[in-house]
Image (cartoon, helix red, strand yellow):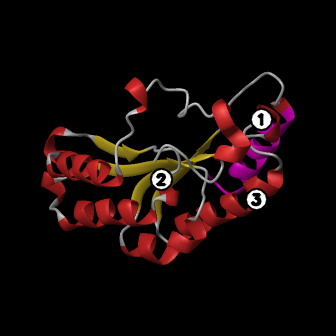
Amino acid sequence: NHECPYTPVCGSSCILAMRDVPDGNWMTVEETRQAGYEAIRNGRYIRNFSVPGMEPFASEELLLDLLRLYHSLPVYERPGSFGAITSGVNAQRLLPALVRTPLSWVIFSADAPEAGLRNSLRTFDPSFQAMLDLWKQGGIEELTATTIFTGANERGMIEIGKRVEAEGL
């Protein structure tokens, strides 16, 4: 998807939106689904499959459809892992489905407010808690966090680092 729930906040600051898509030809949901199917079905040639999207958890049905296919294949036929890079949007709502068909790994985008990508840690808190719940209940096998360093967000990065470390990530 070329937009996510944070688009009004992040706007053109989003690193994923900065990529140059030729003539603005975005893939449809069905084209994305078919590309995902092809990659997963050819998994023996792919070490790690990732859905970085604009916000993969915002495309719930597509994400879960691809995960169901991934988990239906024998280990030797599918990619070595299926991961996502996300800010945690909809994570709590996806909890039951992801416990049944877990992601191998998630990189949680924990941006400090000073980076200009989130308006406050209020956005971070519920998303971070939802990601921890997913990890602790088995919806994610491995969870890590990342952020953008701008030179003006040292305090925010330290706070995020302390919270991540306190949870054992």
Percent position (x, y) of residue 110? 68, 45
Q: Give me the disc on residue 56.
A: 2
Given contact means CB atoms under 8 Å apart, are the residues at marks 1 and 3 in contact? Answer: no
The mark that comes first in sequence, 1 or 2, is: 2
Cα distance in 3D space between marks 1 and 2: 21 Å
Q: Residue at x 69, y 39 (%)?
A: 10
Where is residue 135? Give x, y as percent.
54, 64
Q: Are marks 1 and 2 in contact (CB under 8 Å)?
A: no
Q: Nearer the viewer, mark 1 or mark 3?
A: 1
Task: Measure how far apart labels 1 and 3 are at the Cα level.
Answer: 16 Å
Looking at the rendering, the stretch of residues picked out in magenta corresponds to 155-169
Residue 125: mark in rendering: 3
Query: Looking at the image, is mark 1 or mark 3 earlier in the sequence?
Result: 1
| Residue in the picture at 81% in, 46% down | 119
**Residue assigned mark 1:** 116
| Residue 110 belongs to magenta span | no
Q: Which mark is residue 51?
A: none
| Amino acid type, mark 1 | Gly
